[in-house]
Image: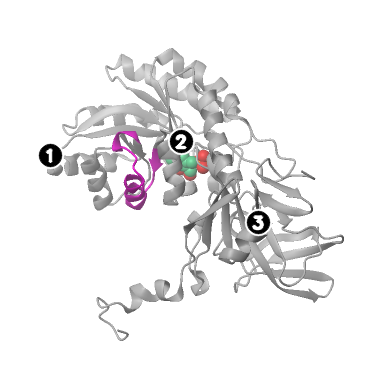
Amino acid sequence: MEDSFSPYFYFLDRELYCEKTPIKKIAKKFGTPVYIYSKKAILDKIKEYKKAFKDYPTLICYAAKANSNLSILKIFQEEGLGLDIVSGGELYRGLKAGFSPEKIVYAGVGKTDRELMDAINAGILSFNVESLMELDVLDQLSEKAGKKANISIRVNPDVNPKTHPYISTGLKKSKFGIDMEDALKAYEIASKKKNLNIVGIHCHIGSQIMDVSPYKEAVEKVVQLVFKLKKEGIELKHIDIGGGLGIKYRPEDRPPHPEELAKVVIPYVKETGLQLLIEPGRSLVGESGALVSQVLFLKDKGDKHFIIIDSGMNDLLRPAVYQAYHHILPVEKKNEKVTADIVGPICETGDFFALDREIDNLKRGDYLAVMSAGAYGFSMSSNYNTRPRAAEVLVDGENFYLIRERESYDYILQPEINEKIQGEVK
Ligand code: PLP
């Protein structure tokens, strides 16, 4: 092993491997852009989380939004995890992947009637309710369904997770949850609803959190509220502290270990005796994945060197929306380095993967890997510019499997040209 970004992606004889598979082999077989995931990286992360929380009754609910490929979901399901969802589509995927509804929690500020009804009928572990109006609607729909819905109130603890503003969700000014000072009232209202069953309390403060102290602040506030509720006769079964642990995007990043999270959270939750729920997404899958692309063209403009690749912001949106850094590695090392902007083919200046980055002197046809792309990569991808979404491949040692085929043009156009279409084009 010459050097490595992680134990799962490393160079051997100047060639980049995922586990025991040369990445070039996968790129040649399935074409590019292609998302490549290491199964071992995912399994090892699950182990880390299980070990960190083993001394306290904890249900780890994987946040499906990070990467919702069915084969990836199945790994978590087989490992006995629960699932955190934010839409009817994720409920549908979760059930297809075999998750038991009793292990599914559902957050989101804007759940439609159909989404609520589907989850009521499934009988999920908890609706993480984000407004008083949602409580009302959920009660009415449960009555219609002849069922009781389990609920937690998502509280907004007003703590700063010290991450990118677009992924800070626990600040008072954000749209998420119900403010702490209004939460008691919300629980009182919920306790009077005939068709609701109060089971817990929920919060989620943000994502890509690199220091666990905001969790301490949040859980302290949540636990105080749990005791206040108890005094009012409102008993809960669980405390759900959401997800958010950060991952390594830059080689020098040292994200917190799940043990550190457990250490700050468990002592508080223990005082209540309630079950703990956590909802990690990014930290379970992020570092397991790379987006592999091929160099299309090189171009020099003034003193700038551009490497134009066949992936775009439609494949990986994070640099464009969060100015996020992703480490980029050549799939085969070169002897020379250049400083370049690595950009996609899309008609937007925001369509870049790296700016002024020192990288191996790649030529037309060479492959490169955008690292730490396993979370919020494919799941945030789109068909912008009528670009088929990438293939996805799961690597297991020296074996690798296609887990989502590359989309075709026909697949993209099908909803516009099928027999239901009533307009001009048939
Ligand atoms: N839970 C909720 C309610 C979320 O909104 C999110 C992410 O947005 C997560 C869990 C997962 O967060 P992360 O991927 O940072 O662990």
Residue at 65%, 56% (x, y): give it. 23
Provide the residue span drawn in magenta.
Answer: 83-103
Q: Type of residue at label 2? A: Glu
Dot 1 corresponds to which residue? 146
Would you say 97 lies left or right of 327 here? Answer: left
Dots 2 and 1: beta carbons under 8 Å?
Answer: no
Label 2: few (<14), some (14–19) or many (≥20) C-alpha neighbours in 10 Å: many
Would you say 124 lies left or right of 194 here? Answer: right
Closer-to-camera residue (34/145): 34
Q: Type of residue at label 1? A: Gly
Structural distance between the alpha carbons of marks 2 and 1: 29 Å
Q: Residue 29 at what x, y percent from top left?
A: 58, 64
Label 2 element class: loop
Residue at 34%, 33% (x, y): give it. 153
Closer-to-camera residue (206/357): 357
Q: Residue 255 at what x, y percent from top left?
A: 65, 35
Res 341 → quadrant: bottom right
Structural distance between the alpha carbons of marks 2 and 3: 31 Å
Res 141 → quadrant: top left
Q: Type of residue at label 3? A: Ile
Give the residue furthest to the right: 336
Dot 2 corresponds to which residue? 279
